[in-house]
Image: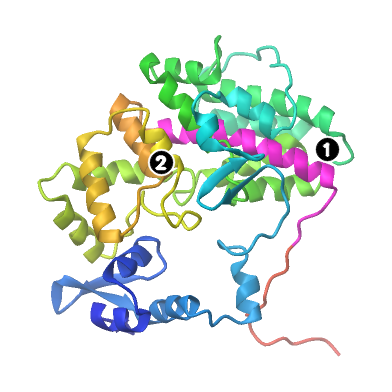
Amino acid sequence: MWLSATEALARLGSKPQSLYANVSRGRIRAKPDPADSRRSLYREDDVDRVAARSRGRRSVAATASEAISWGEPVLTSSISTVARGHLIYRGVDVATLAATATLEDIAALLWDGSVSTPASFEPVANPSVGAALAALAGRAAVDPPSAGRGAAALRIEAAEVHARIGESLVGGGDGQLHERLAQSFGRPDAADALRRALVVLADHELNASTFAARVAVSTGASLAAGALAGLATLGGPRHGNAAPAVLALAEDIGSGHDALEALRDWLGEGRAVPGFGHPLYPRGDVRCPILLAAFEIPPAFARLQQAGEIMLDEAPNIDFALAALTSAYGLPRHAPATIFALARSVGWLAHGIEQATSGQLIRPRARYVGPPLQTAP
């Protein structure tokens, strides 16, 4: 069954912006109204589910199920958290760190101890995310298990793994990682903006790729295996590869004369709007303004930001900022994925060290909803 906007809003008891935001986030499916293409219809069961959640009518089973989808914390960690709208690395606000810290500084902080940068590996012919995946797979096949090893030894291994990731993503060379990254993009003037991006993206508590990395290491697998699981998970468009969709949206909507009308049409077609809102930041993703402050936002993105904030009642997020950074400096289209992978791998390794030293296996249960059980006598 499909509802009109009026019917959907009546059940939700919310403003139109909240309805648009739920459509944008994929929580409520929408389609054009066959009787009037200027209007949309909204999936009834999606609307009722969102309405019930907002009223707090959740069963114990539903609460447990939702714990793995922006729900209550399920693991203890001393590495990072999002609290009161701030991103915190080991007790320090990332806004403070972004002012001067480098990714190397953040690695020492998150790994809870500095280590020397390893000697250079063999040069990588074509640095890319694919090369990093291959490099990690090679190490995962031969590196020793993480189980039963101390934090000091694991930190040394983490530095080796991250050095290999860095060379696979940006190639060799001298200087700190943000400088090497800027050189690899052919835009040395972007170095400081890239430094900020690497700092704010280094960790984000128990996100999807970090959870995957921790699950792998919890079995006793090596840190490289955990980083490989993280990098594989990062590649999805709903996680670390969302910025290209924001670039496409800005090119399609932000360059027009009436971005608000164009975005209204976009939503009317039932398409999600990438680059806005974040469940952990009701007042806006704090990483976005930290990064946007480092460069002049391109006009198309400024128009898209204004239209999105009006239509969705949501602030832009880090995916928006990465896409704007890419446009502002004319970086290659793969730049956001490279930046994200280089930065977040520091966090995966920190969580790998923490998980390995805890000695705990991560093994949640599934709630069975299949055919009736037919057990043997």
Q: Which residue is mark 2?
A: 288
Q: Quadrant of the C terminus?
A: bottom right
The 10 Å Cα crowd at callout 1, few under 14, some 14 to 19, many 20 or more, is some
Who's the residue at 41% across and 51% down the image?
284
Who's the residue at 22% across and 65% down the image?
268
Q: Which residue is mark 1?
A: 145
- Give the extent of the magenta segment: 334-363
Q: Nearer the viewer, residue 205 or 158?
A: 205
Which amino acid type corresponds to the residue marked 2 in the rendered image? Cys
Task: Please give left or right for residue 25 compared with residue 330 in the image.
Answer: right
Q: Earlier in the sequence, mark 2 or mark 1?
A: 1
* Image position, residue 151 (x, y; %): 82, 33
Would residue 351 be seen by someone viewing this image from the given angle? yes
Which label sits on residue 77? none
- Which marked residue is nearer to the observer: mark 2 or mark 1? 2
Q: Quadrant of residue 224?
A: top right
Task: Please give left or right for residue 113 compared with residue 100 in the image.
Answer: right
Report, in whole angstroms, how far the alpha carbon at label 2 lies from the one at label 1.
37 Å
* Image position, residue 65 (x, y; %): 62, 71
Q: Quadrant of residue 269?
A: bottom left
Which amino acid type corresponds to the residue marked 1 in the rendered image? Pro
* Image position, residue 48 (x, y; %): 42, 82
Is most of the magenta stretch helix, strand or loop?
helix
Relative height, residue 186 to residue 23 (above, below): above
Q: Quadrant of residue 272?
A: bottom left
Q: Is residue 36 magenta?
A: no
Relative height, residue 7 to residue 313 (above, below): below
Q: Nearer the viewer, residue 216 or 313?
A: 313
Who's the residue at 40% across and 64% down the image?
26
